[in-house]
Image (cartoon, rainbow, N blue to C red):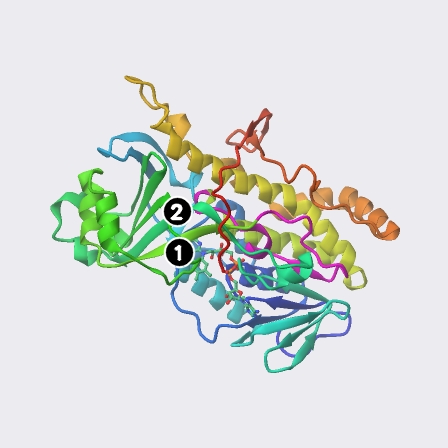
Amino acid sequence: MSSGQPRDGQIRVIIIGAGLGGCAAAMAMHYQGFHVTVFEKIKKFLRLGDSLGLGENALKLLKRWGLHEQLVKIGNRSPNMNIRRWSDGKILATQPLMDMAGYIGHRGDYHQAFLDRVAELGIDIKMGHNVISFNEEKPSITLEDGREFEADIIIGADGIKSQTRELVLGFADKPKSSGYACYRAYFKGDILRSVPQCQPILERDCVNIWIGPDTHLVQNTLRDGEEFNWILTHKDDEDIQESWFQPGDMNKVRESIKDWDPMIVSAVNETRECLDWKICYRDPIPTWVSKSHKIALLGDSCHAHLPTSAQGASQATESAAVLALCLKLAGKGNIPLATRVYEKLRFERVRQAQLNGEDVRDRWHSCLKNLEEGKEVDPEDVKMKNRWLYVFDAEKETLEKWDRVSAIVKKELAEGKVTPLFDSSTGPTRNLELYDAYGNRKADTKLIPKKQQPVTAVH
Ligand SMILES: Cc1cc2nc3c(=O)[nH]c(=O)nc-3n(C[C@H](O)[C@H](O)[C@H](O)COP(=O)(O)OP(=O)(O)OC[C@H]3O[C@@H](n4cnc5c(N)ncnc54)[C@H](O)[C@@H]3O)c2cc1C
């Protein structure tokens, strides 16, 4: 149980941040029998964000924690999605939604479902509690009001601007521009009811993606047109802030897509307001765990994804399951073993999900640019290839690898020399491993070229 005082011998867990990652960690830890307290700096959550994908890899774990039907109901019910040419809407490829982003729903609705389940389990979320410092050794956290709370392990699920990450790294590395930004709008479908040209994409749940040179637009219609969302990704040539609240200039958006397929132009033209969101990423870091081995990162604080990976929340959920199971297997007296096995088990998997997102973005943005005169697009060149990520069972894999990886970690801890997650002279891999739809590894890999703007720091 998580409410009340911890029982004798029970592992005490503090989680910083009650986003989707923090909530998933709270559920996973609770189900392993630990005493969990979550500290969240926001006083009250709003329905923020827009479309977010939850893949089967996350759903199978969430189901074990009693959260499934509630989530499926939130997601898009369309069986397929279409990838279209920007200029005329010609369908270049059609693929099952479940091979792509999984269940795409409103982030705020998913977040609320996660929060409700955490509350149902009796896990204490302390809202309006801003964590400002840490004691690594105890370990403990201190709040803005000076109160200190101690636990056996502290988990920093505090998002892309994570403070815990700074502690783990020993210095501040700011989120960086990916070179792209999105205009994003989510609104009631009513305002489109009288627009004849967009009726085909308003009448029932559907997902369409228009691709063009260095740009793409994702459209998501939910609840048979009750809610409508579009996200236009474009080259980031302005120094906007990384913020979920930065308003976008609708005149600029309308101007930038005026020559596009009239079906989506008609919907964008009617849109009253949008956000301008800089897509930021964080470089992979050589460790996810503090020097004392008792403070660990999880979710966007250590493995933010591009939107085209459609895996940010799903990978955070996998990390939650793996860390909880490692803690269970290692036991209360052996937290360092758990955290160090956790980072080793997670790093490569997460890296592949990140690279997969870069690959799809690059394919979408270059496919029409590189097309020879008179040639048709090969549908395989523009499909999202996420199916292999979904067959994975994070808990099963942890059980299978525990003996081997924990033996390595025990040796490293005994020698006082933990191997970094990647070689700093080469950096993390940029080779995307290729899998078939059943999750079987193919022999070859694909090099994903680094494609970033000269780095603009954001805050
Ligand atoms: C406002 C918002 C909107 C988003 N919209 C989308 C979307 O539309 N589509 C999409 O795919 N992804 C979206 N994302 C990203 C997506 O939610 C994440 O990639 C994924 O859910 C994993 O998130 P996380 O829990 O690791 O981090 P986050 O969701 O960022 O959660 C981190 C939490 O930690 C809290 N926190 C931070 N610092 C402290 C502190 N010092 N003390 C206490 N609490 C702290 C924050 O308030 C926050 O609630 C959004 C994220 C945010 C924050």
Callout 2: SS: loop
Q: Is residue 325 magenta?
A: no
Residue bounds of the magenta highlight: 283-308
Q: Nearer the viewer, residue 373 or 5?
A: 373
At 41% from the left and 26% from the top, the residue drawn is: 380
Q: Is residue 230 above or below residue 117?
A: above
Q: Nearer the viewer, residue 457 or 343?
A: 457
**Quadrant position of residue 215:** top left
Residue 168 bears which disc, if any?
none
Can you identify the residue that label 1 sits on? 240
Q: Is residue 415 left or right of residue 114?
A: right
Residue 203: in sight, yes or no?
Answer: no
Residue 180 in the image: state x and y as whole percent: 41, 45
Residue 413 in the image: state x and y as whole percent: 83, 52
**Quadrant position of residue 39:** bottom right
Residue lying at the far right of the rendered structure: 415
Residue 199 in the image: state x and y as whole percent: 17, 46
Kindly check if marks 1 and 2 are in contact, taking CB atoms under 8 A apart as contact.
yes
How many neighbours does mark 1 have within 10 angstroms: few (below 14), some (14-19), or many (20 or more)?
Answer: some
At 35% from the left and 44% from the top, the residue drawn is: 234
Q: Is residue 292 magenta?
A: yes
Three-letter amino acid code of the residue under disc 1: Ile
Q: Is residue 266 above or below residue 169?
A: above
Mark 1 CB lies closer than 8 A to ligand 1: no
Callout 1: SS: loop
